[in-house]
Image: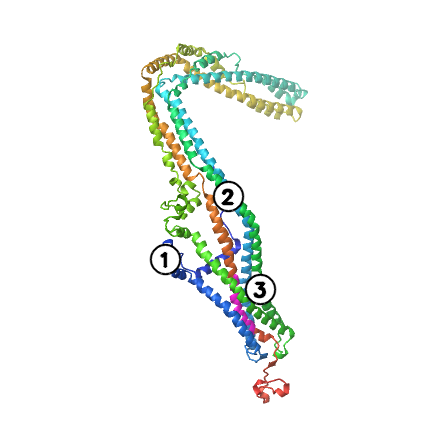
Amino acid sequence: VPSKTYDTGAYHEPGAIGILFKIVHAFLYLVQPNSFPQGKQINYFCLKYRFVIDAIYYEIGFIVSAALGLLFILLLPLVGLCFCMCRCCDNCGGEMHQRQKKNADCQRSCFATFLFVASLIIRQVVGVLCAYAANQHLTNQVRGAKKLVNSNFKDLKIFLNDTPAQIDYLVSQYNTTKDKALSDLNSCFLTKAFFKKFHILAAIRETKEALENVSVSVEVLQEGTERLHSNLTDVKMHLSNTLSDSACNAAQAASTCNIIRNSLSQLSINANFSGLPGVSSQLAKVNDVLKIDLSSLVQKVHIKSVLESIGSNITTFTKMLPVQKIVADLMVYLAQSEAYVQDYFPVVEQYDFYRWLGCLILCCMVVLILVFYYLGLLCGTCGYDKHASPTTRGCISNTGGNFLMAGVGFSFLFSWVLMIVVVLTFVTGGNVEKLVCEPFEDKNLFKVLDTPYLLNKHWKNYLAGIIFKNPNVDLTFEKVYSDCKENKGIYTSLHLEHLFNINELLNISMYTEDVALRIEHIQINLSKIILLDEIGKENLLNFSSSGIDGIDFSAYLTEINKSVTKVDLLSFANDLEARADQLPKGALENALKGHANNIRMIHNQQVVPLEQAMSTLNQSIRLLKRTSSELMVKVKNVISAVNAAQNLINNNASQVIVQETKEYMDTIIGYFEQYIEWVKESIAMEVAACKPIANVIDTAVDIFLCSYIADSVNTFWFGLGGSSMFLIPAIIFAVKLSKYYRRMDTEDVYDDTENGNNGYHKEHLYGIHNPVFT
């Protein structure tokens, strides 16, 4: 069955970002390792009012994670507010006083290292780059989705337009089967019934073909030999002129020229076909004999009407199928859907731009915090002077500490906003992945949809209830999708035998009974049929005396056994070229080589075709010679067989025809059984192959929803959530580190104990408030 090629490849390869997708899938498995609930369990829980409890158990990972996220959203702003108020009261590190410790340099280095590592993780490993890549990937896929959508619409149009043509093709192939059956009736049935002994018919046809071959071959040979004789004469003349050149009189060339001159007589034809007698009179007599028409008798048997009735029944069956109406309705719906998608696709792109911009702003919030942290690290590290006291630190170092505290402030301001987005996208995207995408991939989603009485408490099979209004038909979403995925016909996929059963409508047994019944009641009157009248018998006798035995076969065979030319032209040309090489270099040598090449060309273009014609003539003459030896006996046998057949026709022809028809009926019926089985198989497996429907489902769920949206959204919250979580240690390390970079108002100063001091300078000596002595 002819079918078109579909363009849509329902497969998406994400590229390098696919590594991030796999990491997110692994994380979601840690969050939600429970297997997807089966349909029977879901239905049971619904009936027993335990659905909520089991849903909580299934979603426990998401619930705990979301609760932690909500706790983060509530506590972090509150902690930030308390931290700010605490510092305003010169507590929580707000006092601009730093106590000197012996391991201060080690602590500063550790805090700087930890902050840098935390910032690096936020920025690269699970942070901004991951979120930005996911955000950009979703936008790129949305922009390229239009091509995939158009490809699906194109395939659906091809699917709808091609289906009626495929059905018409199935119907048209019936004529091939019918013609084969009638041909066999013509060529086999009549011969079997009446002309079992008419082997002479084959002999007559062979004789005709042989005579035609003889006539054509002789004509070709006569014309060819005349042309060859003319060309060889020209070659001899030109060679003789060349040998008359003065160069041949030289001592070195004289002997060679004489040898060549003496061999010129060999360049002439050997066989003479002009005197062979023609066979046109014998051919005309054979053609007269073959004018007897024996094939028209087949129309006397009424099998043809039975075959026509089978064809009309098949045509009626195809008209019973509401294919054109269904296709027309679906084409209208498809056109409306395509127009709707085309109209709203720019709106989708516009809203996707707003989404992309919003996600970019969220990424920029994190980037702003990172900028303050990196500037703080850079300025603090570059401007730090270990010989300077906390109260005398430089401006660059102090600026670095301020940058760090600015980063801390923005962390408290932005982190709860980031976490709100993370929680919402996590709950939505994670559940789409676990409840839709993964079950769709392993087909558990279809098993849930196929759960009895789930979608409709009164229907066992929901899809069967929608299509057939009979929910007891075993038609499931999973089976339909799998069959369409394998590109099976829609008749098999949707079990359309419940609407119109082709096994009943195309039951060959009722046609077999009809044929047998008609054969039983055949009434044939062949009394007026004359197989071979007196003129026909006279023609056969004329054929036996057509003169074929009088053909002079010996004359033909004598000329055929001769070679076309007296000498092999190729050998003569090679010998001529070899003798030319013996001559001195010059014009004479070149002229002789040119004549040699001319002789070779004559051999290839004229002698070779003549040899082929002689071979054909040889076969035909020998066939005619064999035929003529037993021609009279065969003709007499034929006339006797015709007389016996005529007697059979006049007396009991109807019984013989019925008997022979019954014997041949199984063969005729076998053709139609094969055709009917082919039609059934084609309708079930090839007509309206529903691969485009599976492609639409794969495109909508697997590609658009899962690969484009869910994977990108999940990767976005994974990156943004990781960044938000690592803001907490970054806040701690930044607060601790800023103390070592900012300029303090007071400090602890140590004296050398060897000078007798107690380790502290007096406050009146330096004008510095010392809380130890107050």
**Residue bounds of the magenta highlight:** 719-736
Task: Give the secondary structure at mark 3.
Answer: helix
The residue type indicated by label 3 comes to Met
Quadrant (top left, top right, bottom left, bottom right) of the N terminus:
top left
- Furthest toward the right, the residue is 246
Residue 168 in sight in this render: yes
Q: Main secondary structure of the magenta part?
A: helix
Q: Which residue is mark 1?
A: 45
Mark 3 is surrounded, within 10 Å at the Cα level, by few (under 14), some (14 to 19) or many (20 or more) other residues, namely many
Residue 732 in sight in this render: no
How far apart are labels 2 and 3 at the CA level? 45 Å
Q: Which residue is mark 2?
A: 334
| 405 or 584, nearer to the observer | 405
Residue 63 % position (x, y): 44, 63
Residue 688 % position (x, y): 45, 40
Q: Earlier in the sequence, mark 1 or mark 3?
A: 1
Residue 49 % position (x, y): 36, 59
Mark 1 is surrounded, within 10 Å at the Cα level, by few (under 14), some (14 to 19) or many (20 or more) other residues, namely some
Q: Which residue is mark 3?
A: 365
| 191 or 209, nearer to the observer | 191
Quadrant (top left, top right, bottom left, bottom right) of the C terminus:
bottom right
| 296 or 63, nearer to the observer | 63
Residue 428's label in the rendered image is none
The residue type indicated by label 1 comes to Phe
Please say if 738 is above or below 226.
below
Q: Earlier in the sequence, mark 2 or mark 3?
A: 2
Task: Give the secondary structure at mark 1.
Answer: helix
Mark 2 is surrounded, within 10 Å at the Cα level, by few (under 14), some (14 to 19) or many (20 or more) other residues, namely some
- Residue 661 falls left or right of residue 205: left
How far apart are labels 2 and 1 at the CA level? 39 Å
From the image, state whether disc 2 or disc 3 is nearer to you: 2
From the image, state whether disc 1 or disc 3 is nearer to you: 1
